[in-house]
Image (cartoon, helix red, strand yellow):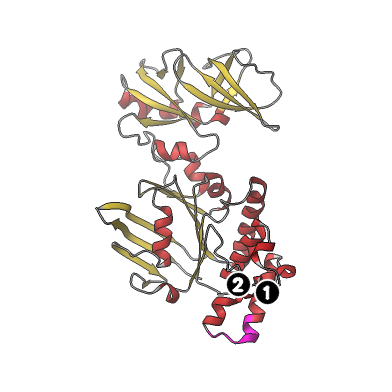
Amino acid sequence: MAKVELKSISKVYDGGVRAVDDANIVVENKEFVVLVGPSGCGKSTTLRMVAGLEDITEGELLIDGEKMNDVPPKDRNIAMVFQNYALYPHMSVYENMAFGLRIKKIPKDEIDRRVNEAARVLDIEKFLDRKPKALSGGQRQRVAVGRAIVRNPKVFLFDEPLSNLDAKLRVQMRAELSSLHLRLNATIIYVTHDQVEAMTMASKIVVMKDGKVQQIGSPLFLYNYPVNKFVAGFIGSPPMNFLTVKVVDDGNSIILDEGSFKIKADSSHNEYLKKFAGKEVFFGIRPEDLVYSESGGNNSFGVKVTVVEPLGADIHLWLTTETQPLVARTEPNHNFKVGDTANFIPKMEKARFFDKETELAIIPSPKL
């Protein structure tokens, strides 16, 4: 397999539109890297530049240390799986998987061995004689993956391959792709707008917004230590809550004044928050870090319940202070009703704070 390096890569379209701006990404050998972000953030364009389907305006693309900017797609030794599967409707599953190998004039016995081995790995052996129209969405996706596998590429590229599948099948295919990665020891670059896919599959996540890389790291590191408000809100489901609060230094502790309630910051955060005394900041707290308390108590605050979403294993509560909305995730053994006032105690050691002007994290991430 291969190491892929994007060095200050940019894509500028006619009119000066920067779809990708100065992206620096390293995909190590055998890594499963997921590019994630909202629609139009540049993640698919980045993938297509790696594939050679888009020209690189600025920067360098290296695969195993070799510059690939001007190398044709067919000579990059990569395989791409598209969102719409891109299968030939008039060919059988076997023919679809073998087509690329035949063009390369691979011997027939070797083609047969590779196709049957890939079909076995993907559990589609019994479909080899069928046409794509006779397959379900999940089966077509397996065929598309099989067509990539038989090429023995250095790098696999996936462009939102699960977006056309229903929710249950997406969960199943996520697990299958993760298992396949381990079995193939493959280098994979995977694009999605679904942060749940990113969190569950990636060994490393690249978060993008407006053509720029926002943060790169392991799923849990990004979840726990987002560098800015965008990453904090994008990673996690339901997303992190953000409340505007005023920072008050009373000499002994830091108080966060929301207007309708006041809570004390964790002492480990005081030295960073002191610099913002008298100013407003974004107080970020994840829904699962809001602990319901029937009796209130120290550092608790009351909010009104506006929506109750029972999900079986837990409940999502949509809440509001006097002026600001938030969401809590709690156990299903409480009888919440719309209009009730509920008390919550935030796990302040888990709180994150962001500069109101720059939206950058106020508390620095630990060094890796």
Q: Sequence order check: which comes first, mark 2 or mark 1?
A: 2
Residue 348 lies, with reference to residue 190, above or below; the image says above
Residue depicted at x 46% and y 63%: 28
Residue 156 x, y percent position in the rendering: 52, 65
Quadrant of residue 339 within the rendered picture: top right
Give the amino acid at mark 1: Glu
Closer to us: 89 or 273:
89
Closer to us: 224 or 108:
108
Residue 249 x, y percent position in the rendering: 35, 18
Q: Are marks 2 and 1 in contact (CB under 8 Å)?
A: no
The mark total stands at 2
Q: Which residue, given by chain and number where applicable, does mark 2 sit on?
A: 96
Residue 188 lies, with reference to residue 275, above or below; the image says below
Q: Which residue, given by chain and number where applicable, does mark 1 sit on?
A: 117
Residue 64 x, y percent position in the rendering: 42, 71
Residue depicted at x 40% and y 58%: 46
Residue 87 lies, with reference to residue 110, above or below; the image says above
What's the magenta region?
Answer: 105-111
Give the amino acid at mark 2: Asn
**Left or right for 59, reference 166:** left
Q: Is residue 92 magenta?
A: no
Give the Cα distance between marks 2 and 1.
Answer: 15 Å
Question: Pointer 2: residues within 10 angstroms few (<14), some, or many (20+)?
Answer: many
